[in-house]
Amino acid sequence: MLALAFLASSALAGELELGLKAYNAKNYAAAMPLLKSAAAAGSVQAQSLLGWMYLRGEGTPSDPRQAAAWLRRAAAKGEVGAQYNLALMLGAGNGVPQDLKSAFSWFRAAAKHGHAGAQYSLALMHANGWGTARDGKDALVWYERAASQGHQGAQLALGILFEKGELVARDLARAAHWYREAASQGDAIAQTNLANLYASGQGVVRDMSEALLWYRKAADQGNAGAEYNLGMLYSTGIGVALDYREGYKWLASAERRGLSQATKMKAFVETRMSADELAEARSRAN
């Protein structure tokens, strides 16, 4: 019996290894039967990956129900990635009936094992009262755990949480800290919000050079709010040399992104320029 068990275990390991090798080579058609056999024999890793393949349509037509079935088997055995992906499916109602309470439960299971995405999602659920009672303290705990692992979304969420002061005590210095963390990772919203704090001197010492730096970083990514604020600064000469043409350029860009207040300000700036200046401004804006 021991010899038979050993042979079965060796065969399982072989199928899993070959399946993983094929998957990593993006030969999904070859990986599918190998991983399916290993999953049926009890490989948690194969079950989790098989669920992912059914979800993504890799080596098979996309089948969310099959995905959920395999992910559930792996999640029940403690596979963290499966717990997280199953929670996402349950939360969105993707291929399974939407069940926010079950999603919350699986996010929590993965979060307790250190999964940053699950920690962020769990915090979101606490903050919004999805599948659980709304709880700012628990939201803060899980946002901070995810943010400390470098999760950009959690860092931004913390900045917003501390700036608004709805679920936790308002703390603009902590808001600035977390905005800076997310902004340093390239988050355009965090860059804009951090610039706003520098421009107003809230939570940080007022510094228009820093404000301009972060507004530019966000505007270069197409953030309409940052473009509008740059346009305002150049058009009023606050913290920067007055330059209607540069202001017009940024206001026009914000207007194209649907910011109605940019239209009004752009119209005003047009009245402050000569015909030649306006022609140059329009050329910059195109």
Image (cartoon, rainbow, N blue to C red):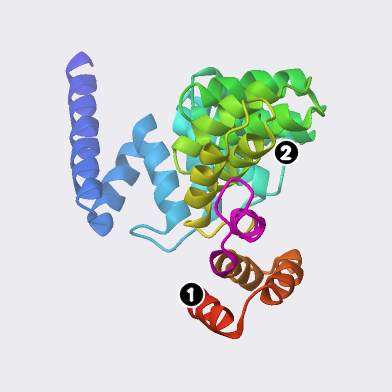
Q: Amino acid at mark 2?
A: Leu
- Residue at the spot of label 2: 100
Front residue (pair 41, 49): 49
Span colored in magenta: 226-246
**Vertically, is 215 above or below 15?**
below
Q: Nearer the viewer, mark 1 or mark 2?
A: 1
Q: Position of residue 210 (x, y in %)?
A: 52, 37
190 and 265: which one is in front? Answer: 265
Rendered image: mark on residue 211? none
Tell me the residue at 18%/42% (across/down). 18
The residue positioned 55% from the left and 78% from the top of the image is: 277
Picture coordinates of residue 118, whole percent (x, y):
56, 31
Residue displayed at 18% across by 27% down = 10
What's the distance in space between the residues labelled 1 and 2, CA to CA?
49 Å
Task: Indicate left or right for 268 with 282 as reference.
Answer: right
Query: Which element is circle 2 on?
Result: helix
Quarter of the view holding residue 263: bottom right
Determine which residue is flagged by label 1.
Answer: 284
